Amino acid sequence: MAQRIYNFNAGPATLPLPVLQEIRDELIDFHGSGMSILEISHRSKWFEEVLDDAIVRTKRLLKLDDRYHVLFLQGGASMQFCMVPMNLALEGRPLDYIDTGTWSTKAIKEARIQGKQVNVIASSEDREYTYIPGQFEVDPDAAYLHLTSNNTIRGTQWHQFPNTGKVPLVSDMSSDIFSRVFDPAPFGCFYAGAQKNAGPAGVTLVVMRDDMVERCPENIPTMLKYSTYASKKSMFNTPPCFGIYVVQLVTKWLEETMGGIEKMAALNRKKAELLYACIDREDFYRGTADADSRSFMNVTFRLADPDLESKFISEATAAGLGGLKGHRSVGGCRASIYNALPLEGVEALVQFMRDFVRTNG
């Protein structure tokens, strides 16, 4: 097998090596079935055990009580941008949104397409989404407040979620699910495309409280209703079986190898602080997000001389540090340091950055 690189891609992103090895070992004959996980029936006892374990481990890791449903859907977070307002809006009541970049902007657009009354109560667009807004007022009559917990493109993150009183929080947590401890109680719903921090592309994790499921109207298509999936434990139709299996293995790795989210969060903070310290130490590099809004998942930065950025990325790739090119909409550099990216990978990147300064500074 060719040597694996340190993978800093933003998504699809790196997966834990032990998970990949377990997939490899089980791929031909899954648990003595004589079939691959890609071939077994989604109604079989083998897959039912996978699904049940993925749900139980997710609830345990996120400290979810019995009010919450763990659903596995398809269509990515982008499908949730339309499903959330379609299912969770309430007649005559506004929908509050906070705009912190591309993904929240898309969510706002999808709600407006449906003719919903959308209030953008705060935005960081005025400074190119380089910070998390701190001053805003939630409408106490709003059906929900939607925000994006971590912004992969601009490298910002909510480090404290707003107090919304009785208004349910709804969040796109695609890029920082399972990465830190938070209180789920204020959240009526949160969702995550798995391909950044929870599993592979093709499965979307949706966590929804009972009272939000009860909002789902009857007059929308069956496959777009959360109640369809909640009532059938994500098995109304053939679910994304392989993706759910990988999520199950990732949650097992988080629990049994990494020691849970508390320990994972401490390691993630250590990785981020190491990398930001390197960026701040040298005039050669410049972080793009405000210091108090910096993401612990996606570290975005520029070089003082933009003409050197392509050289930096190509030489890093040659050195086994892949995926450091910034999003096409903003350019620059980006290191995505999700759960599965080991501390050694960040240490290797920091050493490369120091060496690059010596040879090009």
Image (cartoon, rainbow, N blue to C red):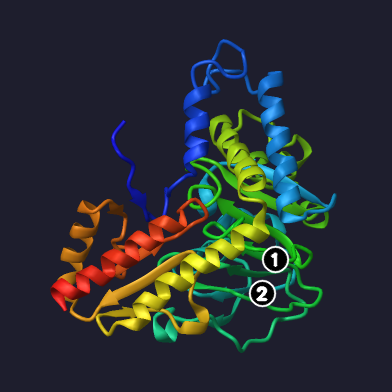
Q: Looking at the picture, which amino acid does disc 1 mark?
A: Phe
Give how far apart the Cα atoms at labels 2 and 1 are: 9 Å
Disc 2 and disc 1 in contact, CB within 8 angstroms: yes
For the point 67% across and 53% down, the residue is 260
Spot occupied by residue 112 in the image (x, y as percentages of width and height): 55, 67
Viewed as shown, does residue 327 lie left or right of 361? right
Residue type, mark 2 in image: Phe
Q: How many numbered dots are placed on residues in this image?
A: 2
Residue bearing the label numbered 1: 182
From the viewer's side, name the closer residue of 174 and 318: 318
Q: Residue at x 58, y 19 (%)?
A: 30
Q: Position of residue 82 (x, y in %)?
A: 57, 56
Q: What residue does disc 2 label?
A: 161
Look at the numbered disc 2 and give the secondary structure of its residue: loop
Q: Secondary structure at mark 1?
A: loop
| Residue 252 place in picture, x, y as percent | 64, 41
Residue 235 x %, y %: 69, 31
